[in-house]
Image (cartoon, rainbow, N blue to C red):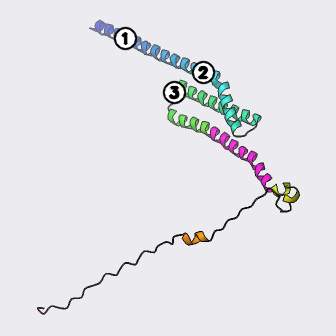
Amino acid sequence: MNEAFQIILIELVFVLLIGGGFLMFRAHKKKEALRNQIKALFKKFSKEAPSRKEEFSSFLKELRLTESQSAERAERLVEAEKNCIKAFASAQLTQAKDDVAFFNDVVYELSAVYTEVMTMARDESKEVVSPVVSDLETFPELLQGDEADGELGEDDDIEVSLDLDDLDNLTKLEEPEPEPEPCLLYTSPSPRD
């Protein structure tokens, strides 16, 4: 009986080794497939990065930023996207237990960069527009000749029309008639009472 027990034990250990080896091989293949997918993601990002920079740059130019400012900000946005992808890849390969919290931090950092760049672009575009307003403040000084003295030229027409007859035609707001107060009927006590 001792030999039979040893044979069964050896067979059981052998089956466990084969099962463990199969699971390790399967995990290795899964990790290898994940690495290949991440490499493909990096290749795709590297291939699309110049067009992304150009898209960001043209968008920022539409916000009236200079060429150098828009190129710098576009580079910063693409770099933030690259850092987000790297952090995501690192989390996928290490399989840390706090993946959800980590993902929140990475997305927050990326959105913070986007918000900062767009806020700076908005503020700088306002600075570009503000000199136009200052030109309007100095507009009377820019007038020449008779116009500067407040006199009207030959071609200047001013038309003011106040028609007081139209005021009579305006309908007055009708006030609602007061509601009659409810009357209380007084009845005399009946003789029966």
Residue type, mark 3 in image: Gln
* SS label for mark 3: loop
Image-quadrant location for residue 69: top right
Magenta segment: 112-137
The nearer-to-camera label among 2 and 1 is 2
Quarter holding the C terminus? bottom left
Quarter holding the N terminus? top left
Image-quadrant location for residue 124: top right
Q: Is residue 115 above or below residue 20?
A: below
Image-quadrant location for residue 63: top right
Q: Residues within 10 Å of mark 1 (few under 14, many from 20)?
A: few
Q: Nearer the viewer, residue 191 or 81?
A: 191
Q: Identify residue for label 3.
A: 95
Q: Earlier in the sequence, mark 2 or mark 1?
A: 1
Q: Identify residue for label 2.
A: 44
Residue 45 drawn at (x, y percent): 61, 24
Q: Earlier in the sequence, mark 3 or mark 2?
A: 2
Q: Main secondary structure of the magenta part?
A: helix
Q: Residues within 10 Å of mark 2 (few under 14, many from 20)?
A: few
Residue drawn at the location 46% of the way across and 13% of the way down: 25
Q: Which mark is residue 151?
A: none
**Quick check: can you spot residue 138?**
no
Q: Earlier in the sequence, mark 3 or mark 1?
A: 1
Residue type, mark 2 in image: Lys
In space, the residues marked 3 and 2 are separated at their CA atoms by 23 Å
Q: Residues within 10 Å of mark 3 (few under 14, many from 20)?
A: few
The stretch drawn in magenta includes residue 135: yes
Residue drawn at the location 63% of the way across and 38% of the way down: 114
In space, the residues marked 2 and 1 are separated at their CA atoms by 43 Å
Q: Identify residue for label 1.
A: 15
Q: Nearer the viewer, residue 10 or 87?
A: 87
